[in-house]
Amino acid sequence: MELSVWVLIISFVVLLAFNVPIAVSIGISTILTMLFTIAPGPAITTVAQQMATGINSFALLAIPFFILSGQLMGRGGIARRLIEFAKVLVGMFPGGLAYVNILACMFFGAISGSAVAATSAIGGFMIPSMNKEGYDNDFNTAVTVTASTTGLLIPPSNILIVYSLASGGVSIAALFIAGYLPGFLVGLGLMIVAAVIAVIKKYPVGGKTGLIESLKKLLDAIPSLLLIVIVIGGIIAGIFTATEASAVAVLYSLFLAAVVYREVKIKDLPGILIKTVETTAIVMLLIGTSKAMSWILSYENIPQSITANLIGLTDSTVIIFLIINLILLVVGTFMDMTPAVLIFTPIFLPVVTQLGMTPLHFGIMMVLNLSIGLCTPPVGSVLFVGCGIGNTSIARLVKPLLPLYAAMIVALMLVTYIPEISLWLPQVLGY
């Protein structure tokens, strides 16, 4: 291996060990690597150029709009209405509040496109409610943390937009549609685990909701759920692109939160906009530095070398796909999803396509894989948010998380080895 590659790996790991923010770690390690490859002046210039090129994409304009839409939804009383609707659907079963938690996280994650937002909004309400009903606090937190990641597969999803950029232009609309069945599969797996635990620990059965009350809660939740229909339906029908859909999502979210539900006031908008700008800046810095690191990896022929080594390792596609999944699972434990997608897509995509996996299928597999890392120590962002909301620690969450991890990994294996789970719906709709 070239000296410059060792510089990249060692400097990146050392910086992460000293808790340097990951975007800064990626940028500094990339610059240090380029100093070993080309002269100092051109090295800095090249990094700057690659960062600017990396974020100079019309498709990425959808990200700040979807972030703003998610912020408006998070402050607009959407979570409470979705929880009440979920109670109507599954609240009457044994351990029903666990199913309500998972279903509400799926709904809200799909609407907001953010696992962290779903954890905050749903967990802030559901964890205390489940505690009052006699559920174990650590179990409640673990369910919230894992279920929140389903929103990264069920569209609209910012990380699928990032993958489209990293893969060289896989259709965002096709990725959005492909994410539905895998997202539902993960949610179903989590519900099965929650059902088993509820029976073993004899968690209480929720009360049944009357017909009139059920209709009222359904009508109250329909405006929120319509966002998914408007955004995804508009994309599928060809009325607007994914980027245009993100702007429509902002307008609809603002109308819903400020006019229909009246829970967002004019005075709240500056704070919402500032939070959106902060989040967008972090995401764009991650994208820029990650694209620069991807460039230096390509310059050093790392993707080509890995492709040759993996394919030369074995003739079994099953084993190679398993190795790639194991590598990504490890990567997900210490790296955020955005840089992981941007850095490892160019490395592994040539391998899987040579073995017959489509870029669309690989994108869904990769996002599902890295979603597990968001609720895995040591640096899972969703895990930390969940610990804060649930007033617990990572050490206490490990035990209740293990069976939920198992359900997510089973779903990952099914998605990896049964392409139709990801590809059937896009094929039916002509993508």
Image (cartoon, rainbow, N blue to C red):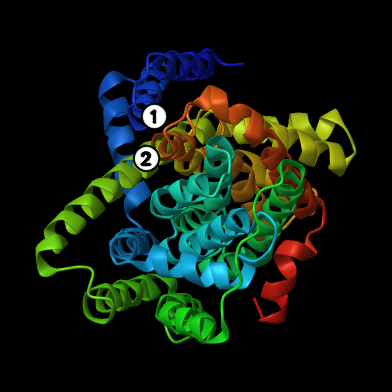
Q: Residue at 23% across / 69% down in the picture?
A: 263
Q: Residues within 10 Å of mark 1 (few under 14, many from 20)?
A: many
Task: Answer whether labels 2 and 1 touch (C-beta < 8 Å).
Answer: yes
- Position of the C terminus by quadrant: bottom right
**Mark 2 vs 1, N-terminal side:** 1
Q: Quadrant of residue 260?
A: bottom left
Q: Is residue 7 left or right of residue 208?
A: left
Q: Is residue 388 left or right of residue 267?
A: right
What amino acid type should be assigned to the residue bearing mark 2?
Leu
Q: What residue does disc 1 label?
A: 22
- Locate residue 24, reporting x and y percent: 32, 28
Q: Residue at 52% across / 62% down in the picture?
A: 104
Reply above or below: 380 against 2: below
Label disc, if present, on residue 106 of the rendered structure: none
Q: Is residue 351 visible?
A: no
Q: Nearer the viewer, residue 141 or 232?
A: 141
Mark 2–mark 1 Cα distance, whole angstroms, equals 8 Å
Q: What residue does disc 2 label?
A: 286
Q: Nearer the viewer, residue 105 or 413?
A: 105
Q: Residue at 44% across / 77% down in the picture?
A: 221
The single residue placed furthest to the right in the displayed view is 315
Label 2: state its secondary structure.
helix
